[in-house]
């Protein structure tokens, strides 16, 4: 015997439930003969995508369609009732390669055997690879006139835009709970199974909008008892009762940790499924949030997966708790439901999640209380604060009462005693202040604040006497520029600031050379300025001026024209020494050693 969802699969468009707009559009296309070449059916699982694709494939080939549905009596309908080569149904989850797509592309050119159209139904089309999509792209865009493609998927976002743009798209929605309940009741009636109305509604809620899931639950419960009641549904599916879920919600929202763990223990002792309990708690919390948002009068229209009896309980909880607490619960429970899918011990995971939720809410409430207390103590009401300030201002200290007149003898004795006593000497600070002499403040060693350092940038005309050996130029902090004491113009300083001259006069000479070359302005002078900026350092010797260059610059300067130009510029500056181009600083070694012996008494300044 087939399962209920296979036995009662829709065979006509009239049997499809919950998809009226889509059914109307498809039947009108068949009636008017406006058949497309490619369709895309998207939606959640078990809502009728594949069933509608099969019905549509038979309807477009039916010789005498009835209201857009296949008649089931003509010769073509009888042929298509069984497997037929003209309707090809392919599972893209297992046939998702490029070779499968190429096979379809090769076979579409053959005419149908006994039908008008050859229909390809590709289920779970999002599982195709990128190469398979590319192979089918041109075929789906311009198939032969006798070919229709119907693509079905639960994840349309995974399809390329090039495929989506070539298809007529229909989005199948979840079936409402009341329609599902009526469908399950109709199936039970045809099967001769006794049931209660509440039990059918609970089965429809467990289906969560999927016809196949709801019929699967109904098939599971069909042999559980002679009469399918709500208790049978709860015991067999592992879900919790609505009243128990409402009690658990109140415990969690109120921050009752002991009560929450007790309620969870009751669910576990009765064999309830922790993921199912979490799912029902999320639905209840969501309904409370809706009731809190729209009010009790309008809440009935937005409540999902809830019976009429639990509506009052939902509205009572909405009146009892705040919006922030309800929304935080919904966020945390959603994360818990996602974690339960991968948890080895669902009960421990759910208990830990609820404990964390309650303790976090208590901590947040405690922090808010402390902040409120601090605000109340430190910042009062502005009107009251102004009133207190006015009260203090108006309340002046009372003037002391006039002193009583003392006897003349007592006054005379006091004056005489004051004249004979030595006059008190004023403090030193008072004397100094009276003399109006500037006195440096006396401070402890720990409180001593040194005077500010002198300005790093001295006037531009200031030039100190050149010592026998001048240390490297001091750099100003942060900008890396040498001190202005070197008497270098700002333009030259910015141009050669990356150079590291051995003595200040070398860098100053480079600046003068750059200025003179800039004034000349010819091509050779511009080229010379560029060469001097390539890491050249200057050393003034007894017989010449040495330009120490890197290896790549040495060959460019070691020629007669370059040396001649340097000598011309040096002569224009009033310097009689001639220029010499040096490859490295090795030839400076002996002179530097002699200078080091004079200053430090040994051959080297640095030791390895």
Image: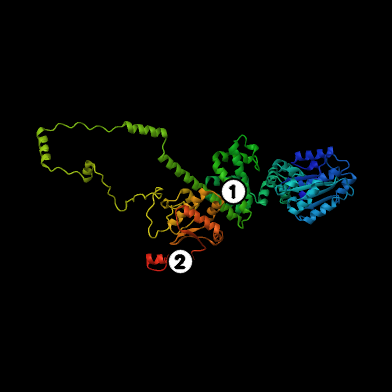
Q: Which quadrant does the C terminus fall into?
A: bottom left
Residue at the image point whose x is 41% and y is 49% from the top? 457
The disc label shown at residue 182, or none: none
Does residue 50 show up?
A: no
The number of numbered badges drawn on the structure is: 2
First-in-chain label (2 vs 1): 1
Q: Crowding near pointer 2: few (<14 within 10 Å), some, many (20+)?
A: few
Single out the mark in the foreground, 2 or 1. Answer: 2
Neighbourhood count class around disc 1 (C-alpha, 10 Å): few under 14, some 14–19, many 20 upward:
many
In the picture of the structure, the residue carrying the numbered disc 2 is: 589
Question: In the displayed structure, does residue 8 sit left or right of residue 441?
Answer: right
The image position of residue 70, as x and y in percent, is: 85, 43
Q: Nearest the camera: 340 or 550?
A: 550
Secondary structure under tag 1 reads helix
Residue 386 rendering spot, x and y as whole percentages: 38, 33
Q: Residue at x 19, y 43 (%)?
A: 426
Q: Nearer the viewer, residue 564 or 13?
A: 564
**Toward the viewer: 418 or 323?**
418
Tell me the colour scheme of the image: rainbow
**Residue nearest the viewer, comparing 42 with 210:** 42
Q: Position of residue 236 (x, y in %)?
A: 68, 51
Real-space Cα distance between discs 2 and 1?
79 Å
Q: Which residue is mark 1?
A: 333
Describe the element under mark 2 as helix, strand or loop: helix
- Residue 598 visible in the current orientation: yes
- Look at the picture and state if 448 lies above or below 298: below
Q: Position of residue 518 (x, y in %)?
A: 51, 49
Give the left or right position of residue 436, taking residue 250 as reference. Answer: left
Q: Quadrant of residue 100?
A: bottom right
- Is 581 displayed left or right of 297 in the figure? left
Check contact, mark 2 vs mark 1: CB within 8 A: no
């Amino acid at each position: 015997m087939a399962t209920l969802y296979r036995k009662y699969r829709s065979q006509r468009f009239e049997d499809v439930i919950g998809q009226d707009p889509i059914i109307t559009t498809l039947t009108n296309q068949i009636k008017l003969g406006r058949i497309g070449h490619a369709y895309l059916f998207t939606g959640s699982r078990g809502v009728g995508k594949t069933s509608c694709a099969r019905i549509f494939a038979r309807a477009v080939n039916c010789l005498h369609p009835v209201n857009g549905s296949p008649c089931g009596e003509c010769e073509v309908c009888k042929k298509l009732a069984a497997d037929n080569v003209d309707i090809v149904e392919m599972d893209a989850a297992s046939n998702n390669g490029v070779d499968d797509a190429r096979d379809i592309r090769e076979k579409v050119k053959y005419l149908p055997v006994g039908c008008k159209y050859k229909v390809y139904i590709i289920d779970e089309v999002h599982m195709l690879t990128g190469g398979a999509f590319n192979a089918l792209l041109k075929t789906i865009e311009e198939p032969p006139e006798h070919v229709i493609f119907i693509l079905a998927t639960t994840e349309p976002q995974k399809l390329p835009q090039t495929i989506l743009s070539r298809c007529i798209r229909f989005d199948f929605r979840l079936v409402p709970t009341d329609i599902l309940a009526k469908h399950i009741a109709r199936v039970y009636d045809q099967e001769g199974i006794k049931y209660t109305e509440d039990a059918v509604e609970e089965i429809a809620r467990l289906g969560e909008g999927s016809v196949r899931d709801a019929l699967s639950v109904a098939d599971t419960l069909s042999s559980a008892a002679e009469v399918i009641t709500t208790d049978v549904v709860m015991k067999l599916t592992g879900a919790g009762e609505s009243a128990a879920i409402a009690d658990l919600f109140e415990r969690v929202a109120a921050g009752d940790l002991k009560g929450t763990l007790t309620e969870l223990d009751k669910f576990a002792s009765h064999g309830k499924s922790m993921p199912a309990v979490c799912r029902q708690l999320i639905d209840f919390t969501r309904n409370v949030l809706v009731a809190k948002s729209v009010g009790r009068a309008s809440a009935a229209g937005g409540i999902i997966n809830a019976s009429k009896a639990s509506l009052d309980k939902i509205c009572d909880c909405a009146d009892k708790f705040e919006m922030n607490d309800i929304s935080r619960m919904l966020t945390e429970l959603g994360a818990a439901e996602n974690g339960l899918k991968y948890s080895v011990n669902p009960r421990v995971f759910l208990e830990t999640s609820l404990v964390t939720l309650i303790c976090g809410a208590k901590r947040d409430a405690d922090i808010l209380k402390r902040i409120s207390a601090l605000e109340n103590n430190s910042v009062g009401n502005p009107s009251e604060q102004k009133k207190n300030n006015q009260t203090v201002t108006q309340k002046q200290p009372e003037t002391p009462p006039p002193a009583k007149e003392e006897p003349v003898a007592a006054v005379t004795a006091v004056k005489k005693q004051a004249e004979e006593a030595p006059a008190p000497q004023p403090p030193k600070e008072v004397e100094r202040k009276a003399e109006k002499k500037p006195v440096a403040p006396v401070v402890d060693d720990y409180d001593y604040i040194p005077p500010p350092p002198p300005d790093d940038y001295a006037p531009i005309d200031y030039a100190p006497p050149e010592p026998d050996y001048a240390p490297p130029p001091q750099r100003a902090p942060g900008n890396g520029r040498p001190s202005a004491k070197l008497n270098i113009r700002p333009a030259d300083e910015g141009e050669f600031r990356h150079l590291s001259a051995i003595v200040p006069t070398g860098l100053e000479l480079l600046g003068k050379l750059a200025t003179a070359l800039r004034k000349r302005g010819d091509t050779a002078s511009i080229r010379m300025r560029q060469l001097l900026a390539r890491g050249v350092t200057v050393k003034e010797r007894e017989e010449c001026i040495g330009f120490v260059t890197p290896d790549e610059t040495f060959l460019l300067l070691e020629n007669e024209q370059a040396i001649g130009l340097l000598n011309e510029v040096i002569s224009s500056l009033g310097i009689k020494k001639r220029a010499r181009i040096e490859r490295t600083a090795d030839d400076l070694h002996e002179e530097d050693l002699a200078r080091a012996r004079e200053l430090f008494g040994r051959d080297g300044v640095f030791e390895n």
